[in-house]
């Protein structure tokens, strides 16, 4: 499941408590209202149904793990595509060198070889 829908994303935040019993302690979390726009099923709301009361971090964590797996699969697929494209580029470079060498041995003038190189570069 993608956790980013409609261009919105939830931000992680760090907060420091102001209550005397927890003064200065930090807690990491997310902004419930923002999470609610992306994955409302993990947010609890006040009785009025509008104001976010909290986030079920257990459920959110499970979704984040699955999203991370999905992202890793995408990264691996992109790495395979990059490797394939790099191999294709290497093959094409070798072809260009072969063509250039053939043009030079055919007794072509340097200007003609540059012209062919320019045409190949544009394609």
Image (tube, grey):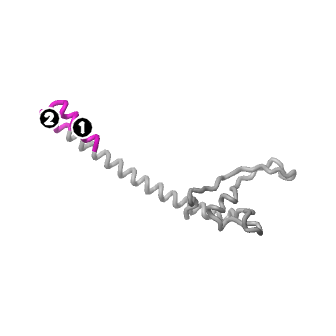
Distance between the alpha carbons at the discs numbered 1 and 2: 15 Å
Q: Residue at x 77, y 69 (%)?
A: 47
Residue positioned most to the top: 110
Q: Which residues are magenta?
A: 100-123
Tell me the tag on residue 83.
none
Q: Residue at x 63, y 56 (%)?
A: 10
Q: Give the side of residue 32 with respect to residue 90, left or right.
A: right
Q: Is residue 99 above or below residue 68?
A: above
Q: Is residue 39 above or below residue 76?
A: below
* Residue at which label 1 appears: 117
Q: Is residue 113 magenta?
A: yes
Q: Is residue 42 magenta?
A: no
Mark before the other along the chain sequence, 1 or 2: 2
Rendered location of residue 73, percent (x, y): 48, 59
Rendered location of residue 100, percent (x, y): 21, 37
- Element type at marker 1? helix
Q: Residue at x 65, y 60 (%)?
A: 35
Given this view, does label 1 or label 2 mark the residue nearer the observer?
A: 1
Q: Is residue 6 above or below residue 87?
A: below
* Image quadrant containing the C terminus: top left
Task: Name the magenta segment's main secondary structure.
Answer: helix
Tell me the tag on residue 105.
2
């Amino acid at each position: 499941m993608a956790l980013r829908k409609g261009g919105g994303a939830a931000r992680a935040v760090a907060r420091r408590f102001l209550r005397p019993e927890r003064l200065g302690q930090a807690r990491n979390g997310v902004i419930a209202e923002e999470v609610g726009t992306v994955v409302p099923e993990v947010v609890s709301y006040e009785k009025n149904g509008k104001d976010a009361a909290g986030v079920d971090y257990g459920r959110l964590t499970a979704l984040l793990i699955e999203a991370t797996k999905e992202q890793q699969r995408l990264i691996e697929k992109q790495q395979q595509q990059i490797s394939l494209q790099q191999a294709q580029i290497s093959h094409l470079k070798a072809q260009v060198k072969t063509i250039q060498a053939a043009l030079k041995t055919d007794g072509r003038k340097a200007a003609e070889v540059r012209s062919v190189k320019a045409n190949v570069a544009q394609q």
